[in-house]
Image (cartoon, helix red, strand yellow):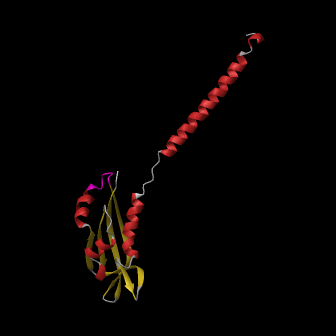
Amino acid sequence: MSEEHGITIQEIVKWNGYFLIFLIFALGMYWMWSNAVKKEIDTSSMTNDIYMSKFLEDGDCLAYSENGATKIGIIDAKKFNSGVLESCLNRKGFSARLVLNYNNKNMTAFNNEDAYILDSRLCFSSRYKCNSKKFYLLAADQDKIYEATLDVSGVLGVIQ
C-alpha cells in the first residue's frame, strides 16, 4: 500500500500482534480468576472437631474437675453418660457416639442417639459430614486415675 492512505501492512500486523497478546493475557487472567473463585472451603470438618473436643475441655461436660479446676484431658467416669453429653453438646444437627475404655471397663454414651443411628448410615451423602477420632487420655473413677482411650464418632448434618 502506498503512504498516502495512512496505514501500512506492517502497522496492521503490529496491531494484530498486540491484540493477540492482549487476548491471550485476558484469557489467562479469566482462567486464573475463575479457578480461584470456585474453590470452596469445607468448614464442616472443623466444626465437627470443635464439637468433638468440647467435652474434653469443659468441666460442665465430661472433663474431670477437682477443687473448681478443670483437668483437661481427664474424663470423669461419673459424668460419662448420655444425659450429661446431651446437655453440654446440645447442637442442632450434631450427633455423636462416645466409647470410653479404661481398666477393663467399656462405657458408651450418645449425643442424640436416635439421630446418630439414622445419620451415621448416611455418611456417604454430601448432606452429612462424619468424623471419627481416637483420643488417648486419662479417666478418673472413684478417686483413681487410669489410662484410657476414647473413641468418638460424630455426624454433622450439613445445611445446603
Task: Report the label total.
Answer: 0
The image quadrant where one finds the N terminus is: top right
Q: How far across and how far down the image is residue 136, in percent? A: 38, 75
Magenta: predominant secondary structure element?
loop
Tell me: 77 left or right of 41. Answer: left
Q: Residue 7, located in which quarter of the rendered image? A: top right
Q: How far across and how far down the image is residue 100, in percent? A: 30, 75
Depicted 28 relative to depicted 39: above or below: above
Q: Residue 18, located in which quarter of the rendered image? A: top right
Q: Residue at x 59, y 34 (%)?
A: 26
Q: Choose between 79 and 86: the one closer to the eye.
A: 86
Q: Choose between 107 and 31: the one closer to the eye.
A: 31
Q: Residue at x 38, y 75 (%)?
A: 56
Q: How far across and how far down the image is residue 23, in percent? A: 60, 30
Q: How far across and how far down the image is residue 103, in percent? A: 30, 82
Depicted 11 relative to depicted 153: above or below: above
Q: Residue 157, located in which quarter of the rendered image? A: bottom left
Q: Residue 3: within the magenta?
A: no
Tell me: 107 left or right of 71. Answer: left
Depicted 59 relative to depicted 30: above or below: below
Magenta span of residues: 122-127
Depicted 156 relative to depicted 77: above or below: above
Q: Choose between 157 and 117: the one closer to the eye.
A: 157
